[in-house]
Image (cartoon, helix red, strand yellow):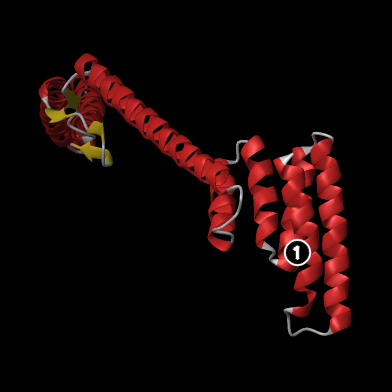
Amino acid sequence: MRFLLIAAITVASLVSTSSLHAQSSASRDEQIAQAKKEFVSGTSAYQNGDFETALAHFRQAYQLTKSPDLLFNIATVSDRMRHDAEALAAYEGYIKARPKSPDREHVEGRIEALREAIRAQQRAELDAEIEARQAAIEAAARVKAERPLTRHVGPGPGPWITIGAGSASMVTGAILVGLGQRDQKNVSGAPAGSSFAEYQDMADRGPRRTKIGLGLLGVGAAGVIGGVIWQLTGGHEEEVPEVSIGPTGISVRGKF
């Protein structure tokens, strides 16, 4: 009944405000006519329980006329729909424009109730945010307790380069030893009556190849063994990066 009473006041207000604006009479009459249609449609939708449509019509009617009485209608529908912020703003605008309204006591009661509801919602949202952050902190603490504090970082590619070079040296040494042994075998197995000049190069080259090959085999073997030991014993322990979640956000500590 209170809504319908204010609705009646609003219709009268819509008609009376036509002379208060500097616009042309025809333009203002068109706005008043359109506002009346919006108001009638909004009232019908409200009575049929279609609050969303009613609110849209009342908002449009208010935009056309800026009649404070329409703020009561907007506030009433918004209040029913639990649009607390919009209802509060509309009630406050209405009571400011109509301080002597017969509904002042009712409106002030709704204003206080809506303010408390909004404060309660804000407290609930803040509590939920605090709870979520606390859960994140606890989860991070559990992860930190379960993970190692350091990790082993290998020596890098150095050992493998050393092993590769040593292996290549051993292969080269083995080839030279084989060639040297073949030269010496050819010299020692020369047919009787052969000329020494025919085998002099082989006689000089064979021991030299064998000596160099044995040297390369030794160097290569040392390189392979040293590379393996380097790979197994090299490297160092490094602090694992730590991710912390706190009130100010996420922070990372450690080395990458």
Give the x, y percent position of residue 9: 75, 56
Q: Position of residue 151 (x, y in %)?
A: 19, 24
Q: Is residue 110 above or below residue 176?
A: below
Quadrant containing the C terminus is: top left
Residue 113 visible:
yes
The answer to whether 3 is drawn above or below residue 157 in the figure is: below
Instruction: Answer left or right for 168 relative to 88.
Output: left
Residue at 18% from the left image edge and 20% from the top image edge: 188
Which residue is located at x 83 percent, y 85 percent?
24
Which quarter of the figure has residue 99?
bottom right
Residue at position x 80%, y 59% from top?
A: 11
Residue at image position (12%, 21%) is 229
How many numbered marks are there? 1
Closest to the observer, 151 or 10:
10
Disc 1 crowd rating (10 Å Cα; few below 14, some 14-19, many 20+) is: some
- Residue 97 location (% of width, % of height): 58, 62
Residue 240 in percent (x, y) is at 20, 29
Question: Vertical placement of 8 versus 163: above or below?
Answer: below
Question: Residue under circle 1?
Answer: 13
Q: Place residue 60 in its image quadrant.
A: bottom right
Asked if residue 191 shows in the view, the reply is no
**Residue at the top extreme, as displayed:** 146
Q: Secondary structure at mark 1?
A: helix
Report the side of 110 relative to 54 (left or right). Answer: left
Between 1 and 200, the one lying in front of the other is: 1
Which amino acid type is shown beneath numbered disc 1?
A: Ser
In front of the other: 194 or 115: 115
- Which quarter of the rendering shows the N terminus? top right
Front residue of 123/116: it is 116
Q: From what the image shows, is residue 245 above or below residue 192?
A: below
